[in-house]
Amino acid sequence: MSNRSEQVTAAVLRAWGLPDPGDSKKTRGEVMIFAGSRSAPGAALLAGEAALRVGAGRVGLAVPPSIDVHIGVALPEAGVFALPEDASGPLPGRLREHVASADAVLVGPGFDDPDQTRATLLAVAGAQPSLLVVDAFATGVLPDVDRTALPDRLIVNANKEEAGILLGRALADDAPADLLEIARRFDAVISCYGLTAHPDGRTWRSDEGGPGLGTSGSGDVRAGAITGFAGRGVDAAQAAVWGSWVHARAGSRLTERSGLGFLARELAGELTPTLHEVLGSAS
């Protein structure tokens, strides 16, 4: 790893701090999450819970109409919106308004159709969100999307395979230069496992985590955490670092306590005590 990469620790994050949470949910930010499918409805739940667990004040979940009622029952803390059957058009008025007013918007967890994902991504971008986080299938379709159609503030949460798609070749095992190339190519903050890169050349590295994070739904939790921090008003790069570190540290805590085999839903639940571990009552 390049010496230019800053090592992320609890002390670094404590020094960065977080915005004052204020005294109501309205002061902790609004997050909108476009996620889920009939085959993977849980992705929306995991991402939504993760955003709430890191302190986002309000979360809205935009999901396919085949699962909206189920999602609303499973996560009563979130507002739920049914996506239009035809993803190729603009977002309906109420949904468009929520995207425009949100502090951060996430697109991608649990989506399973590339064409619909691309159409949804463009529809969301057309509503002019202030900050956009893309994940999973939405990351995979980025090479086919005009960068100027997306908001200036863009965070990409990628696994190694998705990063390889963006790079156009396999990602090296320990190469910040590869991630930095992606960040500059897409003019976005790129987060991939323990590494985060900014187009201006800054990179950050975390050694937290471990094999336990390689479980179904873990990436959805990570994406939701990143979006939750961004929704709270954290700078895009720092939100990506905060989200990836707290997600990984939550995995370390679960491994220390119970060993390999914990579930992504447990990761989501562990985010709040992990954040408290870093900041104490100030979180």
Image (cartoon, rainbow, N blue to C red):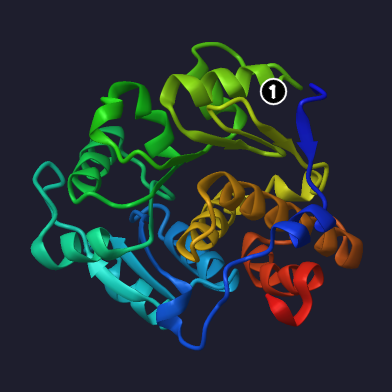
- Describe the element under mark 1 as helix, strand or loop: helix
Percent across and percent down for residue 189 are: 52, 36
- Amino acid type, label 1: Pro
Determine the image quadrant of residue 259: bottom right
Q: What residue is shown at x 91% (from left), y 62% (from top)? A: 256
User: Up-down: is 127 above or below 33?
Assistant: above
Percent across and percent down for residue 120 are: 23, 45
Q: What residue is shown at x 30% (from left), y 33% (from top)? A: 114
- The quarter of the rendered structure image containing the C terminus is bottom right
83 vs 26, left or right, is: left
Residue 64 visible in the displayed image: no
Determine the image quadrant of residue 113: top left
Q: What residue is shown at x 75% (from left), y 68% (from top)? A: 274
253 vs 97, left or right, is: right
Seen from the viewer's position, the closer of residues 265 and 200 is 200
Q: What residue is shown at x 81% (from left), y 48% (from top)? A: 208
How many residues crowd around disc 1 within 10 Å: few (fewer than 14), some, or many (20 or more)?
many
Percent across and percent down for residue 1 are: 80, 23
Reading the image, the residue beneath label 1 is: 176
Seen from the viewer's position, the closer of residues 69 and 167 is 167
125 vs 228, left or right, is: left
Seen from the viewer's position, the closer of residues 80 and 90 is 90
Among all residues in the image, which is located at the extreme bottom?
Answer: 23
